[in-house]
Image: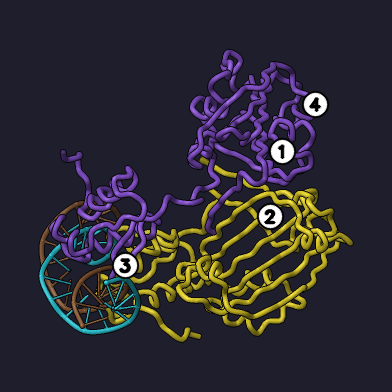
Chain colours: A purple, B yellow, C brown, D cyan
Amino acid sequence: MKRKTPASLHQRILADIQERILSGRWAAGARIPFERELMAQYRCSRMTVSKVLAQLVQAGLIERRRRAGSFVRAPRTQSALLHIPEVRVEVEALGKPYHYALLSRRRRAATAKETALFGWRTPQPLLALRCLHGAGRRPFCLEERLVSLVAVPAAADESFAQLSPGAWLLQQVPWTLAEHRISATAATARVARLLAVPVGAPCLEVARMTRNLEQAITRVRLTYPADLHQLVASFQP
Amino acid sequence: MKRKTPASLHQRILADIQERILSGRWAAGARIPFERELMAQYRCSRMTVSKVLAQLVQAGLIERRRRAGSFVRAPRTQSALLHIPEVRVEVEALGKPYHYALLSRRRRAATAKETALFGWRTPQPLLALRCLHGAGRRPFCLEERLVSLVAVPAAADESFAQLSPGAWLLQQVPWTLAEHRISATAATARVARLLAVPVGAPCLEVARMTRNLEQAITRVRLTYPADLHQLVASFQP
DNA sequence: CAGTGGTCTAGACCACGTA
DNA sequence: ACGTGGTCTAGACCACTGT
């Protein structure tokens, strides 16, 4: 019934209402109780529920209209951060069934370019992976990944046939820095075939190098058909 | 100096303190007046200043410690910083001569979409600008900008014939939040002509909405030929 | 025009951390 | 120990808006 110590009253009320909304019990568009009703329910003053509702507005969970009441807002459109999205999460956020397929998996030594990229002096072993993420029936993202077997030797024993390397690495290896390069490209013949778009079609390409304090872990290039994806980032000066 | 409708009391206090912090007059680390002092200064109740200070905490501008007071926070660390320099700086970093041209400048009321975008209830006046940034002889970036004349009335008196709106706004208006949407697009006929690329050529599009605590300031769409530009971003978990 | 949210007041008690 | 911020109350007036 009661959680440990749900902190302050308005925090408890906030958590309560938030849970109702996020769980879907209060669906999008539904009106939530008036301030004066909530006062009675929680036996508190109007300032207290007002504070809670103001926070819900700021969080984008509800909107309020005079005389009409407070209403649950439609699921957040694009409020995601650029943080580190796992492709699966992105797809499911779109409400589409997620599909994953491993295209190729090869263990090999790094080329000269890759050696420089990973900050090595001499070529080291890499795991090179290519996989395709699908949303519904459509290809959603082509993933081309290099995993440092120096940093993550355990990757050599993973097949990645079912689990995407991004998901595996995320829970396997802690990281401290992710560098992104974001660009627009024209689909090459190979990319066009895999993503089922015309050759030359615009694509959004995200190249990410992930490191921890000691060394480079993995480098991935994600290619999305332009119409299927955009990145969203918020920050403060 | 003050806007016409001073809005509500706590909004005025918020704007006042925010301006002091963002302008640097209250430096990072400095203690700001205690709640009870602010009550006296603004002749209001403690709830009112408390509400204001809570918003400043949420915005990350101050932090509060019991018994000690409230302090201006150090400028945001690079935790989630997407480094987007001014276009001029980008071009000069490439070692190419920078060129700027104003294509059009129009004062008009916001459309319905724009009204929603800026968070207004009724259409307000905007300054709509289009300009072109060049690197060497080549067009480098098409800028399509809307400036809120509510937030920045002084913009109405600027010609922007010589100085780009981005540069002007940066030194004119303090901001606290920038939201980016990054996507790849195919050049439309109009964009292709302006950027001197083939129709359908891939472009990188960055849409940025800049706000302070009270209101939206400006929205800009920057379109770059895909081969000329990429974004770089570093993140920490 | 009635009822909602928006705002504000003048108190109060308490937890906490710093001096 | 003391003064700060954290929280809460029980009122109040007002602006807006949907009916």
Residue projecting furthest to the top? A157
Which quadrant is home to the N terminus of chain A?
top left
Q: Is residue A13 left or right of residue A134?
A: left
Q: Mark 1 packing: few (<14 Cα in 10 Å), some, or many (20+)?
A: some
**Residue placed under numbered mark 1 in the picture:** A197
- Amino acid residing under circle 3: Lys
Q: Is residue A143 left or right of residue A61?
A: right
Q: CA distance from mark 3 to mark 1?
A: 52 Å
Using the image, name the chain to which the residue with label 1 belongs.
Answer: A
Q: CA distance from mark 4 to mark 3?
A: 58 Å
**Residue placed under numbered mark 3 in the picture:** B51
**Residue placed under numbered mark 4 in the picture:** A112
| Percent position of residue B198, x then y | 84, 53
Nearest to the observer: residue A159 or residue B34: A159
Q: Mark 2 packing: few (<14 Cα in 10 Å), some, or many (20+)?
A: many
Using the image, name the chain to which the residue with label 2 belongs.
Answer: B
- Amino acid residing under circle 2: Glu
**Residue placed under numbered mark 2 in the picture:** B205
Callout 4: SS: helix
Can residue B82 be seen here?
A: yes
Q: How many marks?
A: 4
State whether discs 1 and 2 lie on one chain. no
| Percent position of residue A137, x then y | 59, 32
Which quadrant of the view contains residue B126?
bottom right
Q: CA distance from mark 1 to mark 2?
A: 20 Å
Question: At 53% across and 65% down in the image, what residue appears?
Answer: B117
Q: CA distance from mark 1 to mark 4?
A: 32 Å
